[in-house]
Amino acid sequence: MEGLNIYFSDFFCIDEDLIESYGAVNISLINDMPLFVDPFLLFNSEKDEYQNIHKEIIRYLLFLQEQAEKYKELPVGMMTSWYLFSEVKQTWLGFSLDGNGGRGLGQEFAKNLHNGLQTIFADFGKETVTKSPHLEKLCLISPLVGRDKISDFTTNFTKKYILEYNQQFAIENLDNCQCKKFNVPKVEFNYETNTWMAHEYLLPCFSGDYVLLTPRDMLTRDETFINRNDMIGNLKNIAPSIEDAGLRFLLNQYLYEVLPKKKKEMSKTDKEKAATSLIQSNPEIIDYYIKYKEENEEQASSISKQVVQEVKMLFNTQVQELTQMLYQKTNFYKEQSSSYDEAYKRVQYLKKVIEDMDGYRIFYLNGKPIKPCVVGLLSQ
């Protein structure tokens, strides 16, 4: 868009169709876009390279499990070396009201993972119910581990592939002056030395840092395909597939006797606590839920395509349309926002576009109001 840069294609002066044909998302370089790497899409992919990433995640978790057997308490040095990962902010994905900063995987995630590998997931890698182990198991038992943590962990293992993917894109499509060599830490784990290794890549450079385009077929939006809320909501569908008669009886009793009797007085939180208690007492339910998701795996790619397309429609079409209107028909972008009066003027320009130029349409997607992260794009 002439005079106003928002997206990768704007800042690097290339056609957005080029990014589309490469299979990537044309990210905003002003605010994160609400997309996440879903480990199930890697597991379920027809691409060998994606499946290999998922296998590498499982291999590393098995390594951590082996170490967890040696160290019941998580030493600080071990946590720092093997458990703590920064958010790969250079993908410009996730939720942020301003910029692309994130918290990454902190000590709370590390302790949850370490404890989980010693207790409820002590049989990780030895599953008999599911086709494969799955990282998402961690978020199924603990409400403290959400999609952002699972995605951050996954993205760190996808990083090597994405770095190579972007280096190839840069070589084929960008000028030398738009790229720079970067030494990227924690790219690959060396199982002989038990250390993370750095590698050097030629990458797109923006504001002194590298930028990473992500393949859209490994992305989802609101939740990973395997997630806690979905598991609790699907307990009824899981029950018929449970082979253990005793476990199937307990689950049916919970569904048809415990919940209905308390339906009126139980809040949503109480229901979740009851479900959590049942699952903690009978962790095999988790494997049957994952088996249920594996049996319906074709939904994962379908959902991913739909939600990524919705995000593209919102961020790469509707927001462009709105910013174009603000840029061409008002002084919105000529006003600063450092004082109350200047900010008030910007609000008035936005109000004019919304009320007098049908701009209100752009603040809705599929009949629902957009989230605050979209508005952040406008203020730059």
Image (cartoon, rainbow, N blue to C red):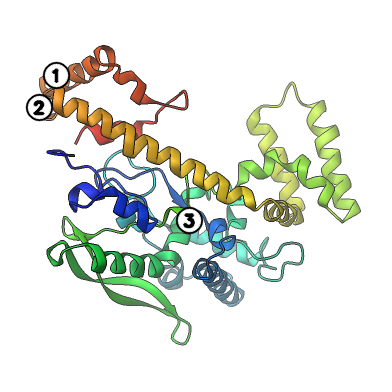
The amino acid type, in three-letter code, at marker 1 is Lys
Q: Give the labeled residue for mark 1.
A: 345
Image mark for residue 335: 2
Q: Secondary structure at mark 2?
A: loop
What is the spatial separation of the Cα atoms under label 1 and label 3, in whole angstroms?
41 Å
User: Which comes sooner in the sequence, label 2 or label 3?
Assistant: 3
- Which residue does the image show at 18% across and 65% down from the upper left? 179
Residue under label 3, please give it. Answer: 218
What residue do we see at 43% from left, 86% from top?
A: 193
Residue occupying image coordinates x 21% and y 32%: 379
Choose between 369 and 118: the one closer to the eye.
Answer: 369
Identified at 12% across, 64% down, the residue is 177
The front one of 288 and 113 is 288
The residue under label 2 is which amino acid type?
Glu
Residue 355 visible here: yes
Label 2, label 3: how far apart the Cα atoms are: 39 Å
Q: Tell me whether circle 1 and circle 3 mark residues in contact (CB < 8 Å).
A: no
Question: Is 223 situated above or below 83?
Answer: above
* Camera sees residue 84: no
Instruction: State the mark number for residue 301.
Output: none
Say if mark 2 contacts mark 1, CB within 8 Å: yes
- Among all residues in the image, which is located at the extreme top? 356
Q: Residue 41: x percent and y percent?
A: 54, 57
* Circle nearer the viewer, 1 or 3: 3
